[in-house]
Every structure is written in C-alpha cells, then in structure tokens.
Image (tube, rainbow, N blue to C red):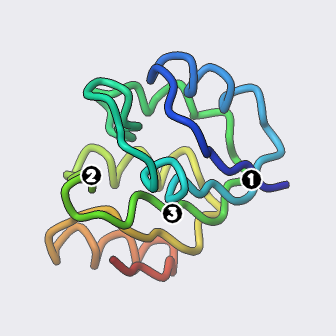
Amino acid sequence: MFFVITTPSSQPEILSRLSELVRLEHLDVREMYHRKVIPGQELRLTLKGGLDVLKRLHRLGTLIGPKCRANMVEWGDAEVDWVLENWPRIETVANYEMNQQFKDRLQDASGAYLFS
C-alpha cells in the first residue's frame, strides 16, 4: 500500500489519517513540498512533532521525506531509537538529516538504506 501526500494540511490531521493506515508500506512526502508550504503545515516527523502517533505502522518499509534541504527534518538519537523499535521493516529512509553516528546505528540495526 502506498500513501502519497500531495496537499499540505495540519500536522495532527495528517498524522491522524496516516496512523489509521496500519498496512502502509511506503510513505512519500516529497510531492507535498512541490507547492508553497504555509508555515506550520509542513510535515515534521520528529518525536516533538508527533511521530509517536505513527507507531502502529509496523509494515512501513520506506520513508521518503522532503527533497528541499530547507524542509528536511533533523533526526536525533531519540528518533532513531523510535524507528528501530516501532518500524521493524524499515529498509529505506530518504531525505532526513542525521549525523553519521545516527546513520550508522540505523543502518547497523535495521540494514536500512539511507540517502539524502
């Protein structure tokens, strides 16, 4: 199952809708950023931004974030820990900023292919 976000909405609304798609395997938010994003309507997949709402997406294997560097989200240790615990099938993560230590942890633990 694929879910592509093409129009900006509020973060809680998007996360709520996504959390219901428990069979979701591929999440791609690139198209959302081809249009002008109104401040506060960008999707921030961080724990502070509400990432925990998506913990039911156990089948998620691919996560592709915004292509524009200005809209990229920075992940820290907490987000990497969360992904490893909640998305056991993750194989590809794209366009999320992580320092090399976090990239190494995610790749070593899950075998995920990371690119930005």
Identify the element where label 3 is drawn.
strand
- Out of 116 and 92, give the one closest to the viewer: 116
Report whether 12 appears left or right of 67.
right
Q: Is residue 31 above or below residue 35?
A: below
Q: Which mark is nearer the camera, 3 or 1?
A: 3
Contact (Cβ within 8 Å) of mark 1 with mark 2: no
The amino acid sitting under disc 3 is Ile
Disc number for residue 59: 1
Identify the element where label 2 is drawn.
helix
The residue under the point 57% across, 26% down is 14
Report whether 69 appears left or right of 44.
left
Q: Earlier in the sequence, mark 1 or mark 2?
A: 1
Q: CA distance from mark 2 to mark 3?
A: 12 Å
The C terminus sits in image quarter: bottom left
**Mark 2 nearby-residue class (10 Å; few <14, some 14–19, many ≥20):** some
Q: Picture quarter containing residue 104?
A: bottom left
Identify the element where label 1 is drawn.
loop
The residue under the point 32% across, 38% down is 46
Q: Earlier in the sequence, mark 3 or mark 1?
A: 1
**Mark 3 nearby-residue class (10 Å; few <14, some 14–19, many ≥20):** some
Which residue has dot 2 on it? 71
- Out of 104 and 20, give the one closest to the viewer: 20
Q: CA distance from mark 3 to mark 1?
A: 15 Å
Q: Earlier in the sequence, mark 2 or mark 3?
A: 3
The amino acid sitting under disc 2 is Asn
Q: Is residue 36 above or below residue 48?
A: below
Which residue has dot 3 on it? 64
Residue located farthest toward the front when viewing the structure as drawn: 36
Q: Is residue 37 above or below residue 25?
A: above
Q: Picture quarter containing residue 92?
A: bottom right
Contact (Cβ within 8 Å) of mark 3 with mark 1: no
The residue under the point 62% across, 20% down is 16
